[in-house]
């Protein structure tokens, strides 16, 4: 076993990267438990090897896996650590993603707190022009407003998200947003 002060080798980094992609696939096909099993040790290895980029990429996927598994407290804690690291690294992309996922977790645990995370993510993604992530954040804020009973705001943000997703050719997300929009009252009844 390697001591904590040894650096992460290029081979280990490539292996972790590949396993991170596999973990993301496990999440996509509804097997987040397998992603968690794969990622928890990789996060520890990344930390021990001082591989911050790996920890950022893998941490975001681990938080998503926890969220999908219903392990909301683990997701929240992972994302708070993730946000601290992203801030230390000054990674706007991962700061925005952390806020997006914190918003998603808040929708499950404490819905009143979700809006602020989505708004923070939107502000950053607009600034860095990360359009797909902007659309994710718009859809999250739309769901937040839908849960708050504000169908007009929900419609506005979900529509913006759908327009971006469709323009970018994003897969899966447009169908989710269309479903959310279909559950809102008719536009004339907002």
Image (spheres, grey):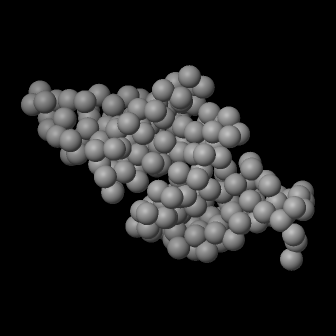
Height in image: 157 above or below 50? above
Residue at the extreme top: 127
Q: Is residue 29 visible?
A: no
| Front residue (pair 174, 104) | 104
Quadrant position of residue 94: top right
Please name the residue shown 25% across and 30% down the image. 153
Q: Position of residue 158 (x, y in %)?
A: 33, 35
Quadrant position of residue 114: top left
Height in image: 178 above or below 50? above
Q: Position of residue 141 (x, y in %)?
A: 35, 37
The answer to whether residue 113 is left or right of residue 57 is: left
Q: Position of residue 19 (x, y in %)?
A: 71, 65
Please name the residue shown 88% across and 71% down the image. 2
- The quadrant of the picture occupied by the N terminus is bottom right
Q: Position of residue 115 (x, y in %)?
A: 34, 38
- The quadrant of the picture occupied by the C terminus is top left
Height in image: 59 above or below 175? below
The answer to whether residue 139 is left or right of residue 43 is: left
Quadrant position of residue 14: bottom right
Residue at the extreme bottom: 1
Please name the residue shown 59% across and 68% down the image. 35
| Front residue (pair 2, 14) | 2
Q: Is residue 94 visible?
A: yes
């Amino acid at each position: 076993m390697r001591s904590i002060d040894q650096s992460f080798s290029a081979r280990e980094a490539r292996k972790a990267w590949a396993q991170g992609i596999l973990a993301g696939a496990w999440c996509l096909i509804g097997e987040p438990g397998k992603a968690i099993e794969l990622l928890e040790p990789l996060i520890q290895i990344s930390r021990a090897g001082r591989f911050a980029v790996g920890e950022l990429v893998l941490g975001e996927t681990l938080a998503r896996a926890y969220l999908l598994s219903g392990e909301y407290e683990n997701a929240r804690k992972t994302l708070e650590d993730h946000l601290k690291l992203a801030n230390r690294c000054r990674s706007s992309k991962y700061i925005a993603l952390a806020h997006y996922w914190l918003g998603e977790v808040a929708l499950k645990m404490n819905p009143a707190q979700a809006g602020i995370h989505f708004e923070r993510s939107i502000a950053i993604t607009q600034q860095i022009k990360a359009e797909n992530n902007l659309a994710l954040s718009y859809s999250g804020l739309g769901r937040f407003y839908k849960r708050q009973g504000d169908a007009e705001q929900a419609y506005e943000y979900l529509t913006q998200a759908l327009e971006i997703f469709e323009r970018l050719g994003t897969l899966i997300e447009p169908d989710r947003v269309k479903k959310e929009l279909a559950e809102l009252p008719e536009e004339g009844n907002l």
